[in-house]
Amino acid sequence: YGIKREEMIAVGDQTNDLPMIEYAGLGVAMGNSIESIKQAADIVIGSNEEDGIADFLEKYFSTNGTCSTRKDFPRRYSAFHFFSSWIL
């Protein structure tokens, strides 16, 4: 698909999500994640009961992808890149 790992965002909450959280350019842990996922992630968002992913997506797209805390994360990506990386 030609998508660089630096262009990927991975969201997870359990042990099976650890490889993608570590691999992606921006690893996002849900607030209800297990501790190892929170430690591996670049940012921790609200829990699934707090609509954490919806809030994150709204902020991400309304700020043109500038809500990252990782210094080397590229600042602007299209919706295609974001969703392609999420579903791969």
Image (cartoon, rainbow, N blue to C red):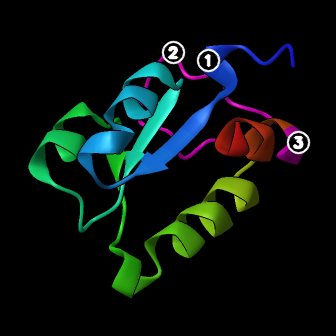
Question: Is disc 2 in contact with disc 3, using a CB cutoff of under 8 Å?
Answer: no
Residue 65 can be seen, yes or no:
no
Q: Which residue is mark 1?
A: 6
**What is the quadrant of the C terminus in the image?**
top right
In percent of width and height, residue 42 lies at 35, 35
Residue at image position (23%, 68%) is 32
Query: Of discs 2 and 3, which sits in the foreground?
Result: 3
The relative height of residue 63 versus residue 2 in the rendered view (above or below) is: below
Q: Is 72 left, or right, of 21 in this rendering?
A: right
Identify the image quadrant of residue 45: bottom left
| N-terminal-most mark, 1 or 2 | 1
Q: Residues within 10 Å of mark 1 (few under 14, many from 20)?
A: few
Q: Which residue is mark 2?
A: 72
In space, the residues marked 1 and 2 are separated at their CA atoms by 9 Å
In space, the residues marked 2 and 3 are separated at their CA atoms by 20 Å
Per the picture, the main secondary structure of the magenta-coloured stretch is: loop
Residue 30 can be seen, yes or no:
yes
Label 1: element kind: helix
Residue at image position (73%, 61%) is 62
